[in-house]
Image: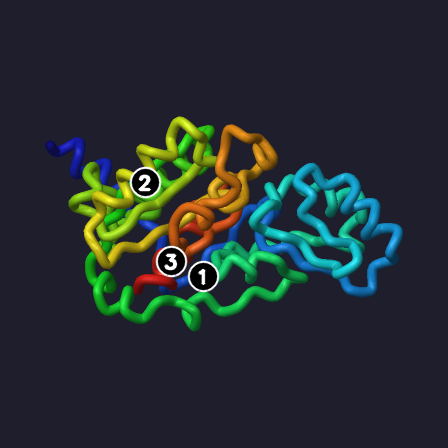
Amino acid sequence: MLNVLKNRFEQGCKTSTYPKENIRLLPRYRGRPKINPDAPPDVAAACATACPQEAIDPAAKTIDMGRCVFCGTCERISRSRFVAFTQDFSIAVAEKEHLITAGDIPDLAAHSRQHFKKLFGRSLQLRQVSAAGCNACEADLNVLATPFFDLARFGINFVASPRHADGIVVTGPISRNMKTALLQTYEATPEPRAVIAVGSCALTGGPFRGSPEITEGLDTLLPVDLFIPGCPPHPMTNLHALLTFFK
């Protein structure tokens, strides 16, 4: 016991000070993309051609964050003349059309469901459903329970049963084999319930888009309240989205 207390004293508090203090992520992190409207058309076209997700519209000069896997190919090709990824991790949106952007993203707090804030502001219980995910999004959701993020200090927890949940968090491209299980989980969650789509696979099908084995977007099956883009979304993106939308 004395050794435990000694280690605790030496290590100090490891929990992040966010949201009281902002966090700067590593320089290699790719967050909110910014589009240069004055970029040469040939550069924009080259980025659109190289994009593995067909997320770039060179004519409108926009990028679809729902499709984007934040690989950075467009940034490298254009040498940041057309697309540059910032360190802004606050990229979640409440409306799917807001994912298509030139760099400006609406304030999530202004688009959050106010009745959710009243109902779940002090306690939010979520059931996570991995609908054929690769475990990347799932891992970055699980890490929110670690001492650094300590999601529970905000009254947010992941629970084992949908009957104990206020909403569901869905990851993965929603394969044909997982579709029934997902819908049953949704039906088992008491109303009013929130639906959160996490990761490009859940938003648009991700790299599996076009396959007959998956659903191209959770919103084609269920009414989605919160869209969190990324492949996978950074834990800070998930944390910011949950706090902004529900608290």
Residue lying at the far left of the rendered structure = 1
Q: Is residue 214 left or right of residue 52?
A: left
Q: Amino acid at mark 1?
A: Ala
Q: Which residue is mark 1?
A: 94
Q: Which residue is mark 3?
A: 18
Q: Dividing the image into 4 quarters, which one contains the C terminus?
A: bottom left
Q: Residues within 10 Å of mark 1 (few under 14, many from 20)?
A: many
Q: Amino acid at mark 3?
A: Tyr
Q: Residues within 10 Å of mark 3 (few under 14, many from 20)?
A: few
**Can you tell which mark lies on residue 183?**
2
Residue 220 lies, in percent from the top left, at 46, 48
Which dot, 1 or 3, sits closer to the camera? 1
Q: CA distance from mark 1 to mark 2?
A: 21 Å
Which dot, 1 or 2, sits closer to the camera? 2
Q: Dividing the image into 4 quarters, which one contains the N terminus?
A: top left
**Can you tell which mark lies on residue 196?**
none
Q: Secondary structure at mark 1?
A: loop
Dividing the picture into quarters, in which one does residue 122 lie? bottom left
Q: Is residue 200 left or right of residue 152?
A: right
Q: Are marks 1 and 3 in contact (CB under 8 Å)?
A: no
Residue 99 lies, in percent from the top left, at 57, 57
Residue 203 lies, in percent from the top left, at 50, 46
* Residue in view at x 78 percent, y 64 percent: 37
Q: Pick the residue in front: 43 or 87.
A: 43
Depicted 205 relative to depicted 134: above or below: below
* Residue in view at x 39 percent, y 36 percent: 138
Q: CA distance from mark 1 to mark 3?
A: 22 Å
Q: Are marks 2 and 3 in contact (CB under 8 Å)?
A: no
Going from N to C along the chain, the mark reached first, 1 or 3, is: 3
Which dot, 2 or 3, sits closer to the camera? 2
Depicted 31 relative to depicted 11: above or below: below
* Residue in view at x 38 percent, y 49 percent: 222
